[in-house]
Image (cartoon, rainbow, N blue to C red):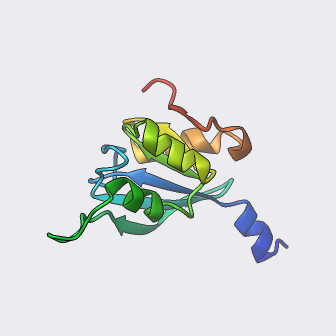
């Protein structure tokens, strides 16, 4: 029997920049939402949808800082593009950024075939 701590350590939390909930279809900074998925060696499930809403009128906005904060508890971010500033801020927090336009399911299948500790810190999903 595994402990809750062992299960937590074996779970990879992934944020997907997606408007439709099916494809990775947005730039990291400007996505309207992140689908948060928990992946274990045998399963993956969406556990939360986090809205990436712009600040209200008249309030200073930092879209990059807001987006980074929304995924701070994730190990991997999937986005169509991230930009060098975003990649640097994510990498500084230990978050790997993978650029792709694949379906979320395909990207998760790809992640399931890799050990999280050997994922590139930034990169592109092969074939995309």
Q: Position of residue 116 (x, y in %)?
A: 68, 46
* Residue at (53, 55) in percent of width and height: 14
The extreme left residue here reads 57
Answer whether residue 82 is visible to the viewer in this image: yes
Location of residue 128 (image quadrant): top left
Q: Position of residue 35 (x, y in %)?
A: 41, 59
Left or right, 99 with reference to 80: right
Q: Position of residue 99 (x, y in %)?
A: 44, 36
Left or right, 39 with reference to 48: right
Position of the N terminus by quadrant: bottom right
Q: Is residue 57 above or below residue 74?
A: below
Left or right, 106 with reference to 39: left
Q: Is residue 15 above or below residue 25?
A: below
* Front-lying residue, 109 or 50: 50
Count of marks, rendered view: 0
Left or right, 9 with reference to 15: right
Q: Position of residue 36 (x, y in %)?
A: 47, 62
């Amino acid at each position: 029997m595994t402990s809750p701590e062992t299960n937590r350590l074996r779970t990879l939390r992934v944020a997907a920049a997606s408007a439709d909930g099916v494809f990775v279809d947005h730039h990291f900074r400007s996505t309207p939402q992140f689908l948060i998925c928990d992946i274990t060696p045998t399963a993956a499930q969406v556990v939360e949808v986090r809205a990436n809403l712009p600040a209200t009128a008249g309030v200073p906005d930092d879209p990059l800082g807001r987006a980074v904060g929304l995924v701070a508890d994730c190990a991997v971010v999937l986005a169509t593009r991230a930009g060098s500033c975003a990649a640097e801020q994510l990498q500084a927090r230990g978050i790997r950024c993978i650029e792709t336009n694949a379906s979320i399911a395909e990207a998760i299948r790809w992640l399931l075939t890799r050990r999280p500790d050997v994922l590139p810190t930034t990169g592109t999903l092969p074939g995309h």
